[in-house]
Amino acid sequence: MTENADGVVATRQEGAVGHVLLNRPHAMNAITVELGRKLEQALRALARTASVVVVRGAGGNFSVGGDFKELARLRAAGADAVRPLFENFRRACDAIAELPVPVIAVVEGYAMAGGFELMQASDVALVRSDAVLADNHTNFAQIPGGGGSQRLPRLVGRQRALGHLLSGERLTGAQAAEWGLAYRSFAPAEFEEGVAAFVSRVAEKDRAVLGKVKRLVRQGLTMALADALTVELAAVIEHVEGEAAAGGIASFTEGRGADT
């Protein structure tokens, strides 16, 4: 089912999987005011019915970050004109944490600056091993504006984050996985098959369960461990009383889930 095939963000849903495509291949999916706005809309719309949402870029690249041509034009008009570019993109990235389903970034080609930040904002990232990733803001006398200065140190620690942000050095997809920025890195010949297998495995799970696990992890990271464990305890006691948990228990005890 195609919902929006022609705009800067294209969407479709295939079964339990929602697909969001950054659709400016001629500009390597550079982020504009409109793209940021439509990305948030697409994510929220698909999350109403899908069990998992996949985000990737058109034309063999994820995204090279903010569109400098648009930034130059907006900058000439003043701060009020520039603000929507960053605010729209932030709302799209922030929305990911709020959605009741996991969002998976599928990254190939270039994922630079804002594209790299979008990958960090996602729940899970799958990368092609030869992808080129970087927060390269400092290479162009810029500073991060899509969460890179805040999410990156939380993901990889202060030393790696500052070293990377200050140098603007590039990472391969394989290195990103080594750093913990991606769940899995696939060789080019195995990329599409590996992505499809992982997405399918997640999508076959109970939608509500996926949302509960995501919420526990996201919420727990903002809390002290003792408080987070208390939240988890309350959540699991409530959950095991529900139908989904009952079905899972029955499946296992009857021998159908021993090898899954």
Image (cartoon, rainbow, N blue to C red):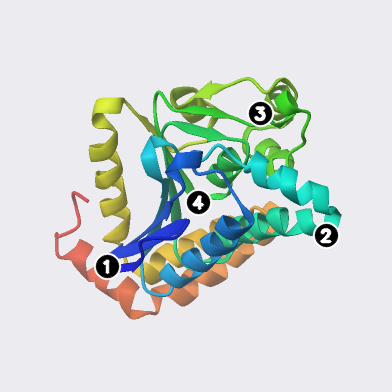
From the viewer's side, name the closer residue of 222 and 173: 173
Residue 180, image x, y percentages: 53, 33
Q: Residue beneath label 4, please?
A: 123
Q: CA distance from mark 2 to mark 3?
A: 25 Å
Residue in front for this viewpoint, 230 or 71: 71
162 up-or-down from 56: above or below: above
Residue found 48% across the figure and 73% down from its top: 237
Cβ–Cβ under 8 Å for marks 3 and 1: no
> Of tags 1 and 4, which is closer to the observer?
4
Helix or strand or loop: what does disc 2 sit on? Answer: helix
Q: CA distance from mark 2 to mark 1?
A: 53 Å
Quarter of image, res 116: top right
Mark 2 vs 4: CB contact within 8 A:
no
Q: Which mark is residue 80?
A: 2
Image coordinates of residue 5 in percent, x first then y, are 35, 61
Q: Which mark is residue 248?
A: 1
Q: Nearer the viewer, mark 3 or mark 4?
A: 3
55, 185: nearer the viewer: 55
Left or right, residue 18 beside residue 111: left
10 Å crowding of disc 3: few (<14), some (14-19), many (20+): many
For the point 71% across and 53% down, the residue is 86
Q: Nearer the viewer, mark 2 or mark 1?
A: 2
Q: Which circle's residue, 1 or 4, is located before the other in the chain?
A: 4
Amino acid type at circle 1 is: Gly
Label 3 belongs to which residue? 136
Q: Which amino acid type is marked by label 2? A: Asp
Mark 2 or 3, nearer chain start: 2
The numbered mark, 3 or 1, whose residue comes first in the sequence reads: 3
